[in-house]
Image (tube, grey):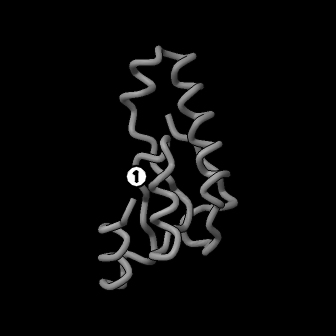
Amino acid sequence: HQFINRLWAIGTGKVATPETAQNVHEKCRAILADMYDQETADATRILYGGSVSPESVDELMSQPDIDGALVGGASLDSEKFGRIINFQV
């Protein structure tokens, strides 16, 4: 299953606040728990699919229900991408 939010989609340059992103991811995990069970929900990796940048990655990845990020245009710049994949929590 996929959960898509086009407002912060990759390529828009718009980044959700960490709090908003966490809220959406938490709801997605709750839906998975309802559909299957809590163990499955907890084991499922939920990725942030909005625009992510070197400036936003640390706060986004520090959220408990954000398990990773899909990186768009920033992956084309080696310095930006290097910073993103080496995020600091």
| Label 1 packing within 10 angstroms: few (<14), some (14-19), many (20+) | some
Position of residue 17 relative to residue 84, above or below, is: above
Give the left or right position of residue 59, taking residue 83 as reference.
right
Q: Position of residue 77 (x, y in %)?
A: 36, 85
Residue found at x 48% / y 42%: 64
Between 66 and 7, the one lying in front of the other is 66
**SS type, badge 1:** strand
Q: Position of residue 78 (x, y in %)?
A: 30, 83
Position of residue 8 relative to residue 38, above or below, is: below
Between 77 and 17, the one lying in front of the other is 17
Q: What is the residue that sits farthest to the front in this orientation?
A: 89
Give the left or right position of residue 22, taking residue 1 as reference.
right
Q: What residue is shown with label 1?
A: 68
Residue found at x 64% / y 61%: 16
Residue 80 position by quadrant: bottom left
Q: Position of residue 39 (x, y in %)?
A: 39, 18
Residue found at x 30% / y 76%: 82
Residue found at x 69% / y 60%: 7
